[in-house]
Amino acid sequence: MSFKLYNTMSRTQEELVPLKDSHVRMYTCGPTVYNYAHIGNYRAYMFEDLLRRWLKYKGFAVTQVQNLTDVDDKTIRGSRETGLPLREYTQKYKEAFFEDLKTLNIEPAEFYPAATDCIPEMIAIIEKLFAKGLAYKSDDGSVYFPIDKFPEYGKLAHLDREGMRAGARVAQDEYDKENAADFALWKGYDKADGDVVWDSPWGKGRPGWHIECSAMSMKYLGESFDLHTGGVDNIFPHHEDEIAQSEGANGCLYSKYWMHCAHLQVDGKKMSKSLGNFYTLRQVLEKGFTGREIRYELIGTHYRQQLNFTFASLTANRAALARLDEFYTKVQETIGSETRSPKLETQNSELETRNSELETPLPDWAQTLAARFEEALDDDLNIAGGLGALFDGVHEGNKALPMDSKTALAVSNLWKKLDSVLGFLIPPAAEVPAELIEMANARVAAKKAKNFAEADRLRDAITAAGWTVQDTPAGPKLKKA
RNA sequence: GGCGCGAUGGCCGAGAGGUUAGGCACGGGUCUGCAAAACCUGCCAGAGCGGUUCAAUUCCGCUUCGCGCCUCCA
């Protein structure tokens, strides 16, 4: 089955066919590193993560570039307010961004170029545009792109220039531009920029916002690449302007497909500081939720649908994850129970090798799960359909327990395969403190002696320590509550 | 004003022109010292009004409501 995606450019679903072989080159708009990124930012990065993981699952080679915007109004303001040099100021937030990606188990892209490292490439594009008459310099030293000279301007956003008038907040006091809608390629030096300044053939200044993405994508992916993604808000003007600059300069197609992620809302409202519903990832973690739980929340709604983020659903997701973990743990125990020996690890990996050699077939229910999952994800990343298949599979899998160890191993391998897409399926190994194990064992002894009061007391103590104990045929099982 | 998206059960959220989505929560049962988990089972749907059709929650139109973009916000 082929992967179908919704292309913003055509406003229809299309089959993904890379420009070259089975190699997908994708560019994803990254963070502006002026602050800790908020959960809305991560919703978009999560969508891109699911996309890249699905492409790899489908057998495509993926080269992903995600930029770091480290020079713009906000980073400059932050750097001036804190009295730190721009590079030093943004460094902190760059590092925080990478930490957050780890927390959410987002796979790293192949390249994370910073805007300030690609200034020469940006200048080169602007020079090309000058040569083609697609750039002009204004009196204040800025360089603009004349959109009237690019007839296809508006093709992505489906904006016709006539409709852009009434009601739109087009700044009328932007002097120096030939047309109010022309956008800046280069911003002439302003005193407010302090020491944030570069030389260029047309004078001192700094790059415009849009040009950085054109420069960085071209540098790593070539003049034409396969897939460009971002938040819906980027469609206009950012991506429209990227197309104008890039196609204007190169005279060839910029990106074959465009995918855009809808916004996240909190409690049904647009997230904003004034409404008090604005959260960085770190703030949600501080409320006691794990990266894995937040990942589940952010990935679980189709990317083109607004995601309503609530703490209630985050809590509900915890129970759903526990259900998945319960099943996975039982499967692991089944594998372990028939390979009990001091060299458990070795045996397991041997078994695993043997399994792949012999290709122990998956039971019917697991094959159905995999097929339904793939069908759903192939349909423009229908994650809800995929999760439905997963939970149906868990239901059937629970019924199929106990299973023999070879089957369990095959199921376990399927789980690992699916986890390469979902990134939350394999539960984190929890280290059980020794004294809790002792308490659990003491409780078993108390139960044998029919001293149920003592057994309950021990269970309460374990609960108070933040764990739960379950009685299973294989003995007591401790889980983090 | 222009462009676009959406409205499903207590909550979250899919697919399909006639056949169980799924998750969370809740009710009953099996198992268990009691629990937990698991299993069985129940429960509650598709904004409103028209139209097409043998049949629509699913297609079309209108209305209402919500949301996004319209110059640097993912």
Image: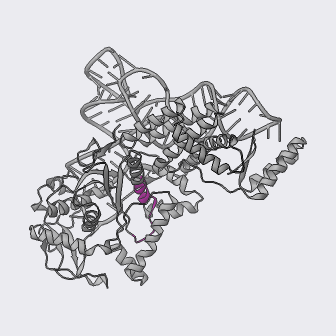
Q: Position of residue A237 (x, y in %)?
A: 24, 60
x 39%, y 83%: residue: A85
Percent position of residue A446, x then y: 87, 46
The residue lying at 35 percent from left, 71 percent from top is: A114
Quadrant into which the N terminus of chain A falls: top left
Left or right: A68 in relation to A289? left
In the image, the segment drawn in magenta is: A33-46
Q: Nearer the viewer, residue A460 or A356?
A: A356
The answer to which quarter of the image holds residue A409 is top right
Residue A49 highlighted magenta (yes or no): no
Vertical arrangement, residue A179 with respect to residue A62, above or below = below
Tell which of A399 and A266 is nearer to you.
A399
Residue A339 position, x and y percent, is: 68, 43
Closer to us: A191 or A202: A202
Q: Using the rendered image of the protein, determine whether residue A271 is visible from the camera's viewpoint.
A: no
- Please, is residue A14 above or below residue A50 in the view? above
Name the foreground residue: A173 vs A221. A221
Relative placement, left or right, of A181 versus A403 is: left
Q: Is residue A259 visible?
A: yes
Vertical position of residue A286 compared to residue A416: above or below: below
